[in-house]
Amino acid sequence: MTPKPAGKTRVAVVGAGFIADNHLQALSELTWVEVVAICDPKQSAAEALGKKWKVRTLCSDVDELATLDPKPHVAHLLAPPALHEKLIDKLLDHGISVFAEKPMALDSKTCERLAKKAADKDLTLGVNHNMCFHPAIVELLGEIEAGTIGTVQFVSSILNLPLRQLATRQFGHWMFQEPQNILLETGCHPYSVIHAILGECFDARTRIGEQVELPGNKVFYKSWRTLLDCERGQAMSYMSMGREYLSSRVFVIGTDGSLDADLATGSVMRGRKTRFPEFWDIASNELDDAKRKRRNARKAFFDYTLALAKIRPRNDPFYATMKGSVRAFHEDFRDGVEPRMGAEEGKAAVVYCEKIWEGREDTVSSAKGGSGSKPSGKQKHKHGKKGKKHKKTHATPIETSSAANGAVDGAPAFTPQQRERKPKRNERVLLTGGTGFIGSHVVEHLADAGYDVRCLVRNAKYRPEWMKDERVELAAGDATDMASVRDALEGCKHVVHMATALQDDWESTKRFNVDSTEELAIAAMVRGVDRFVFTSTIAALYVGDMNENDVVPPDHPADPMPDGRSLYARGKVLCERILQTLHEQRGLRFVNHRPAVVIGPRGRTRAAGAGYWPTDNHCMGWGPGTTPVPFVLAGDVAEAIVSSLDADDVIGKHFNLVGDVRMTAREYVEHLAEISGRPIEFHPQRLGVAQGLDLFKWLVKAAVKKPGNDFPSYRDLKTRALRPQFDTSLAKDLLGWKPCADLEEFLEIGIRVPVSEGG
């Protein structure tokens, strides 16, 4: 085992993704640890993380860590699972111990080999099975060890949770590449806990529930029900992803009692025998549980409040698991003992995954749906120059089970029509943001219109379904990397710029959205592109002082006072200003589109234009919700954008893109509730009340000096109500634009299909 370091334990963080911030925060609380380097091939990510946590040494490859003097004692390996084996091998070869994110590796044989290699080199290899350090699990394991419930006989684990990547269709993520990957990505959490209670898994019988068909003929299994025979008893595991309601529990039955750990609330309920009659047992246990729940509720409230006030360190349940796991590893490392979650535990969790996968039944539930179901009821429009006839075609949404996704039985379905494609134009378009919601529809419309489409994407290895077209090519890079932008512009006649990176502060918003847009436009001018088509938003306008009888013309100027607006709106306003200036002073052939509240396939049903959604089934309105919301279908927006590439007299023009079906926020939520079969409610709210709540939150943050706490702007709040009408005549005249005007068609494409996808 690695000798105890003489001074502080030197740590390198390998991988600068989302989870790295939690590791670094946990490490910052350990006085005997020093983070000496951050390693990631994407240097911009390493730089941002290094700046935040004051780590000066940045590397792009783990081989560089071996050249540091002195080199790190330990590397926290936070790279994607597919890279674990290669990177652990390299780190061990360099004499660096490893604390790896789960899973340790992709199969148990590799885990065994790596464990032996670490032991042979007298190095430590630990795995971050952080759920075992959840406060409720720590309490539960302590009770079991103390013999409170006697001998454990049975364990039941439930993990029912939302899955952001599934909801946002980020199918390039590793967990979607193979059906069994979700076991390693998420299943390792509950399986590591079951292993801690019952030991090794000998056999598993698995029933797979709903499945989701992904692009590329791939399948994602949403729910897994498994019976497990283990070393010290039996278990039942239920794991389901992409759900609306979070529930995570571990229930343990022993010879003399039971324990029920609720990981969502952090409470542990007990059932025990007493010396009194059975009726008193029940009352006594219920009273004890009520006391624990009250105590836990107070603790959760004060933990959050005091952490917000920076009187007490952050200690929410998720971070508590990370802090506990990281601390345990480094305590064991300093003491020169085997880590509590070491290579053997890492291997055991992978064995559970293998047994569960091997034990699945041949038949899979026919229920399909949820986020990602294919196809997406694509809305396709023909387009062209002014005066040309437009024809809409539709692909039929995949058959879905109402039990799976809440669809209403007997809902009308549109008859599929043959998609029409124009001959190739021999004109190439550079598109940014093609993996996004609206961008995905623009890709399809460009290809159908005959354009060769070059999509600038961060990950060229992942090709979504809508990009699997002979007319579509992928170019690796992003709008902030001018070298990749210049390469991607080669041979392109037009640019359609849609990429928007949502950020938490103005400095990052300006860098990733405003500055990158200016640089892209200048580079496009240098290359001599014919048209630079920009996708802005009606949020770039200020309409807070208008009422429902006012009309916003297409040439309405962007908000003259953007500093008090949201980061998103402020960024779009400045982008419009810059592009307008480049058009007027340097001849940029600029076209600007301002879509309104966009809904449709691949999108989310929680439309921000209807109100603020604190949860997915409650909408707090921007007012009474009785004025029409300017909805528009994503396919209609795409049609307008593509049409502006060859339409006459559009240079320098601004187009309001609002659909012809108008419904209020109340009506939208009512339709959404009816179609989804869920209890979704609209709550009218006066803007003054909303502003008061925002002010209260601002005061709390100001009291604790939380960074990035901008004063809530009532001016920004007023414009979110979107009360006036928007004049779309220019788009209809110059682009021949014909947005959806039929209510049933609108409901089918705008609500029913996204609901069937789990949006």
Image (cartoon, rainbow, N blue to C red):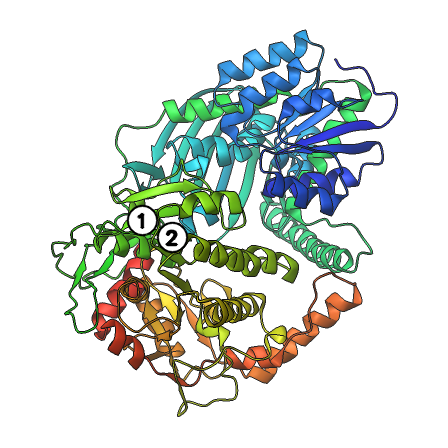
Left or right of 711: which side holds 258? left
- 421 and 195: which one is in front? 421
x, y percentage for residue 322? 67, 39
Residue kind at label 2, given as amino acid type = Leu
Q: Secondary structure at mark 2?
A: strand
Identified at 51% across, 71% down, the residue is: 581
Quadrant of res 497: bottom left
Q: Quickly name the residue at label 1.
A: 453
Placement of the N terminus among the 4 image quadrants: top right
The residue located at (74%, 34%) in the rendering is: 57
**Would you place residue 669 above or below residue 517 in this image?**
below
Instruction: Please name the amino acid that badge 1 sits on.
Output: Val
Disc on res. 89: none
What secondary structure is found at the residue carrying circle 1? Answer: strand
- Tell me what residue is drawn at x 24 percent, y 41 percent: 470
Q: Of residues 620 and 37, which is closer to you in this image?
A: 37
Seen from the viewer's position, the closer of residues 474 and 363 is: 474
Image side of residue 96 versus residue 747, left or right: right
Residue 93 x/y as whole percent: 65, 13
Image coords of residue 263 (percent x, y): 59, 45
Q: Residues within 10 Å of mark 2 (few under 14, many from 20)?
A: many
Q: Is residue 401 above or below residue 218?
A: below
User: Is tag 1's residue or tag 2's residue first in the polypeptide sequence?
Assistant: 2
Question: Which label number is shown at residue 431?
Answer: 2
| 120 shown above or below 704 | above
In the rendered structure, are the residues bearing label 1 and label 2 in contact, judged by CB atoms less than 8 Å apart?
yes
Residue 234 visible: yes
Quick check: 485 left or right of 464?
Answer: right
- Residue 565 appears at what percent x and percent y? 59, 73
